[in-house]
Amino acid sequence: MNKKKSKSVVFVLSLASFLHDVGSDMVFSVWPLFVTQVLKANMATLGFIDGIGDAVVSISGAVGGYISDKIRKRKIFVWTGYLFGGLARIGYALSPSWQWLIPFRFLDRSGKIRGAPRDAIISDVSSRENRGSKFGILRAADNLGAVVGIIIAIFFLKTLGFTNLFLLAAIPSSVAVLLIIFFIRESQPNHQVVFKGISFINFNYNLRLLTVLSGLFALGSFSYSFLLLYANKYGFTTFQVPVLYLLFSLFAAIFSIPFGKLSDKIGRKNILYLSYFFWAMVLMLFIFYSNFVGMILAFIFYGLHKGALEPVQKTLVAELAPSDYVASTIGAFQMVIGLLSLPASFLAGFLWDRFSPITPFYFSLTLTLISVIMLKFVKEPA
């Protein structure tokens, strides 16, 4: 694919991702407040709902990647995923109790069926020298969309209320659907591949080790909802909490491209080490410095962590994957991460309710240290 067409594909995918995330974060910047204060769920229930969502992400990502490689199609999964997300927001708006959120959470997170096929498109139009940069552009668009969505939530939540805000959030995803349908042209593979599926047995040693350590890290990486509610508990008002989410998303947006480009130069592992360090800083600030300034610093480091982790982790998985099964491999990898996110958020909620709000942070810090040690033994492809 020529450079001009490659840039066009990345631009359209990034714009669609930007729009979808505008709507997503109009909802998710106030999500924990909506679930616990409006629909009266406790912390364990919030962790359960968030964990269900993460687990569904893992399954839908694996299914999307598998079928996409099998039928050699990507586009349909991308626009369908955005459509699911838009419909789910309407469901959230109309839910009278927290129990009603569960099916719409399933629908919303099933929209992640788009993830692996979309990432495979990015990988296909990239080279080893610019793949990190292009994944960084996509993640920057995601996070910039989050910034815009959060700003809308901050300024209009009081005026519109949760219901109307969530209904409004469905509109950007509808535009994203149209962008993918009309402006992404799918190319046929240059050769026929007999697809026999992919399993963890097909992962090489380095990819298996990366999957295991990333899964351990995910087990301690509870939902952002806990960070927001902890801040709410220690001094930030209900209407100030989205500002922290904005701060996190802004830093993630600003640094996704630089971290992606830097990984092209100094290697993926070095940026992953950096991402784990940023997360450890988040945890230590919450544990030892839980005041107004500490919370602000923690969300800055959280943004840096996401800006470093998400584009580079996917880039490394794509490069370790068999070339004909990139979507399947990314989907399988995300399945492991997502399945461990269900017990992660539920366990964090249990530890919060049963012991203290600080206990989940100690647990996560321990798993982060183990993951860092294991990463040392992963070798990047030449």
Image (tube, helix red, strand yellow):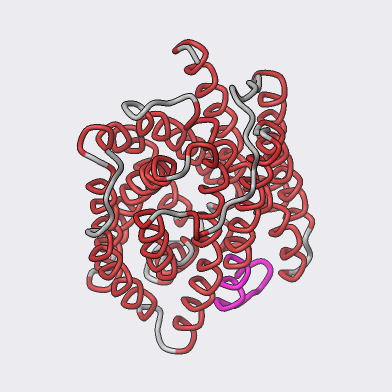
Measuring from the top left, give residue 325's x and y in whole percent: 54, 42
Q: How many marks?
A: 0
Who is closer to the viewer here, 88 or 207?
Answer: 207
Relative placement, left or right, of 95 versus 196 is: right
Quadrant, the C terminus = top left
Can see residue 112?
Answer: yes
Q: Is residue 149 magenta?
A: no
Q: Residue at x 66, y 51 (%)?
A: 63
Q: Would residue 240 appear left or right of 83 to someone viewing this image?
A: left
Q: Is residue 346 above or below residue 306?
A: below
Span of residues in magenta = 35-50
Measured along the vertical axis of the image, is residue 5 above or below residue 293? above
Q: Residue at x 51, y 59 (%)?
A: 200
The one nearer the camera, 86 or 247, is: 86
Q: Is residue 148 visible?
A: no
Image coordinates of residue 321 in percent, x first then y, are 45, 44
* Residue positioned 60% across, 25% down in the render: 191
- x, y percentage for residue 209? 36, 61
Is 374 rendered above or below residue 309?
below
Kindly indicate the quadrant of the structure image that contains residue 190: top right
Query: Residue 238 at x, y = what percent?
Result: 50, 61
Q: Quadrant of residue 139?
A: top left
Name the chief secondary structure element in magenta.
Answer: helix
- Kindly indicate the quadrant of the structure image that contains residue 175: top right
Horizontal side of residue 120 vs 166, given as left or right: left
Q: Is residue 64 above or below residue 48?
A: above
